[in-house]
Image: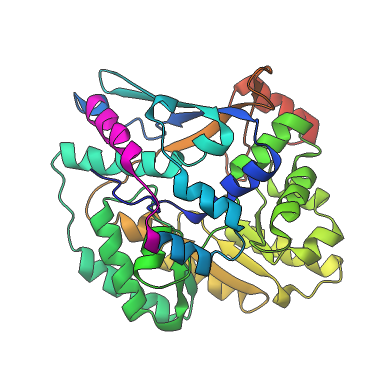
Amino acid sequence: MIIKHFTDNDLYKFSVMHAIQRLYPWSYVKYKFTNRGNTQFPSGFAEKMKEEVAAMVNLKLSKDEKKFIEKRCYFFDPVFIDFLEGYKYNPEEVLIVQDGGELEITIEGFWYRTVLWEVPLMAIISELYFDMTGVKPQDVEEKALAKAKELKNIQADFSEFGTRRRFSFDVQDKVIGILKENSGAYFKGTSNVYFAMKYNTIPIGTMPHEWFMYHGALFGYRAANIKALEAWVAVFQGSLGITLTDTYTTDSFFKSFSLKQAKLFDGVRCDSGDPLDFADKTIQFYTENRIDPTSKTIVFSDSLNVERVREIKKYVNGRLHDTYGIGTFLTNDVGAKALNMVIKLTDIKATPKGEYLQAVKLSDALGKNTGDLKEIEICKLTLGVE
């Protein structure tokens, strides 16, 4: 069994689950797996994956996990934590089909339930693929130690964000242990709640693209950012204050980012596009709104390695607080080519009896748009995005 712990998942999935339960408990959605790297999966992969998914019905929040969440996740109310204690994965929400080397996965059901599937499914896909193709990890400890020392040397605050595309649970486990032991105060935590508990560190994460995608589909693309941020604040009251900007492009985001929201949110996250250009735009936005940029944070999280972190940090040069969420480079740099894949929200409806609306995501990077092509064009025309 690949997923052995209920909290072997990223914090942001639990945080958005909490928000969904509060505000949109009747919402019904679909997600779809996209194989960006056109990986060919071995014969029998779907059947093995179905076995892994079926086994997840036995996962349950342990007493230790509950205590950790109560202590560290102060932004969750006791009603939600009690709900987690009784939550059971329902494998019937996941459809897995294989045709030759092609793999198709769809998820459908109440949004407050299905939101937890994305990260563990991707972790299963990755680990199962490498297991079935006989790939063995190489130099895990040596590479992790070198990275820990380099990041400490360049004085970069960073967190581990690598659950979704990790080589395996064991590799991620080893890497986080080495990072915590050898990076000093610069290692700020991990997005994985289970490993945050195991290594007594901070679970890191805020909101996902799907939060904005849902609001864009339901309320319209011009209102998406405003509606999504106001809804987030209504639930978390200022906690979890790092916002994504690129769901409908960063330029569009800053046009709708109000002074009130800019002051309330602690900072922004750069998840696509040119990070240096992003830093300039962010600093300019805060300066024009008479907000001291050094009081705000940018979380850089797009395809980072040590050299990229060094370049960004040198460029930012203390003009605001820079921190780095590093994923695949930490948990799948073991001599194998990491899978290029995503699972994204595709359709939403406010109630199970309603009609589905298509959900799309733009990006600050060419080629990373997701969703129906006609709907993407409607979104671009609405926002004036080329």
In the rendered image, the quadrant that contains the C terminus is top right
Q: Quadrant of residue 64?
A: bottom left
In the picture shown, does residue 279 fall above or below 48?
Answer: below
Closest to the observer, 8 or 71: 71
In the picture shown, does residue 67 fall above or below 229?
Answer: below
**Whole-percent x, y for residue 345 in the image:** 56, 33
- State left or right for residue 222 relative to residue 33: right
Closest to the observer, 292 or 96: 96
In the picture shown, does residue 210 fall above or below 229?
Answer: above
Number of marks present in the image shown: 0
Q: Residue at x 86, y 61 (%)?
A: 259
Q: Residue at x 40, y 25 (%)?
A: 92
- State left or right for residue 184 relative to residue 223: left
Q: Residue at x 24, y 39 (%)?
A: 128
In the picture shown, does residue 91 fall above or below 246?
Answer: above
Closest to the observer, 86 or 315: 86
- State left or right for residue 329 relative to residue 269: left
| Magenta-colored span | 47-64
Q: Quadrant of residue 217?
A: top right
**Whole-percent x, y for residue 176 in the image:** 33, 67
